[in-house]
Amino acid sequence: MTTPHPGLSESPFLVAARGGQPAHTPVWYMRQAGRSLPEYLKVREGIGMLESCMDADLVTEITLQPVRRYGVDAAIFFSDIVLPLKAVGVDLDIKPGVGPVVASPVRTLADVEAIPDLVPEHVPYISQAVRQLVAELGATPLIGFAGAPFTVASYLVEGGPSKEHARTKAMMFGAPDVWDALMRKIAGIAAAYLRIQVEAGASAVQLFDSWAGALTPADYRDSVMPHSQRVLAGAGELGVPRIHFGVGTTNLLGLMGEAGADVVGVDWRTPLDRAIPLVGDRVVQGNLDPTLVFAPTEVMTARAAEVIEAGRAARGHIFNLGHGVIPSTDPGQLTALTEFVQSYPR
Ligand code: CP3
């Protein structure tokens, strides 16, 4: 394991994630690296998304870009939730403006069994990029991440992005043995992927269950949560704080915390004052509406102040948007927002 930078454990992000009192409210943005940055578009010219994720030097550069530009309190590793599937040999691509597309969707037990487990040899560029990043980042923490079993299953079963997740949920309701095998397979891959990142030096992890909000609490608890729980327990054994995030999860926030999260990410539709009692004695992350960056700066920062004030009722608060940065976002607005949050009185 890489020796951690001496300033890392005192970084506002890690102090807050562990429930301590940081010097300022830490801030980072989901999808902070990407199409809203001209320097990103420049380095990505002519290179496919997955190809970029497999180039350690490019991953390092892209991950650092938002840290340099905004001075955010954490970096998030540049990759994608479907990268580990690609790495084990699943035939998929990320289509610009569409998202992940899987050539042969998974429908049967044989389809599930054909997916290999992930071993470090599948992703040498991941450990290399993490090591390079940790050396460059110094006292700024690197967040590793993986897609949660339900969200990744949706791409595998639907074959691409989906609003209703109908085939995925039909498998969950109608073919519980295939579902269980699929969820176990993805959970194993996610746990291995997180372990590789943490062992190379990532100091926190986020599990993205972006589409879990499509489930009732009972279905989430019975058919999804046990698998996410295994992934989070694996990361917990490595001693790093775990963030658990999904979209439209008002009804699931309590369970998402119980699944083994130190920090529960909240999307912008649930006000923090409502979310905090639901997550209990945990740190919250979020949750400014990502479209507020298109409003005048004073309007955006006034709303950010409301989010920070509401966050005071929680065990701890990490400021973020309520979902990813929208590609047409003006980077200048995120610079202003970052400065505003970091200088807001504690
Ligand atoms: O800055 C960061 O947050 C780190 C990088 C990151 C990406 N994807 C890069 C990316 C992270 C953390 C993800 C996670 C991810 N990928 C999620 C969970 C987070 C969420 O948004 O809820 C999901 C559901 C995916 C699947 C996926 N990959 C989608 C829906 C898309 C968007 C398709 C599009 O083009 O609109 C992608 C592609 C993707 N992942 C891009 C980036 C920068 C855009 C591709 C490009 O720049 O060509």
Image (cartoon, rainbow, N blue to C red):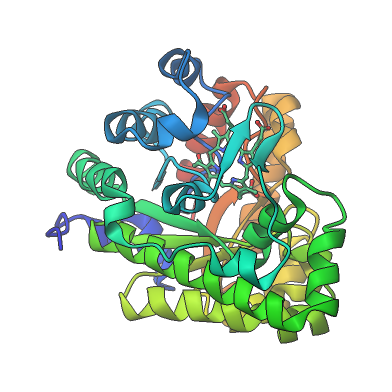
In the figure, residue 93 lies in which quadrant?
top right
Please give the name of the residue rendered at 58% of the width and 42% of the height, measured from the top-left corner.
92
Position of 9 with respect to 65 (left or right) is: left
Return the x and y of residue 111 as percentages of the image width and height: 63, 63
Q: Position of residue 284 (x, y in %)?
A: 58, 66
Residue 313 visible:
no
Q: Nearer the viewer, residue 281 or 158?
A: 158
**Left or right side of 40 for 213:** right
Q: Quadrant of residue 64?
A: top left
> Along the line of sight, which residue is nearer the eye, 109 or 47?
109
- Which is more toward the observer, 109 or 328? 109
| Total marks in image | 0
Q: Which residue is at a point 27% across and 30% down the rendered structure image?
A: 57
> Quarter of the image containing the N terminus?
bottom left
Residue 243 appears in view? yes
Residue 14 vertical position relative to residue 329 in the rendered view, above or below: below
47 vs 109: above or below: above
List x then y, in percent, for residue 29.
Answer: 54, 43
Q: Residue at x 32, y 57 (%)?
A: 197
**Residue drawn at (24%, 63%) of the image:** 199
Which quadrant would residue 309 be assigned to in this image? Answer: bottom right
Q: Position of residue 276 (x, y in %)?
A: 68, 73
Q: Quadrant of ligand 1?
A: top right
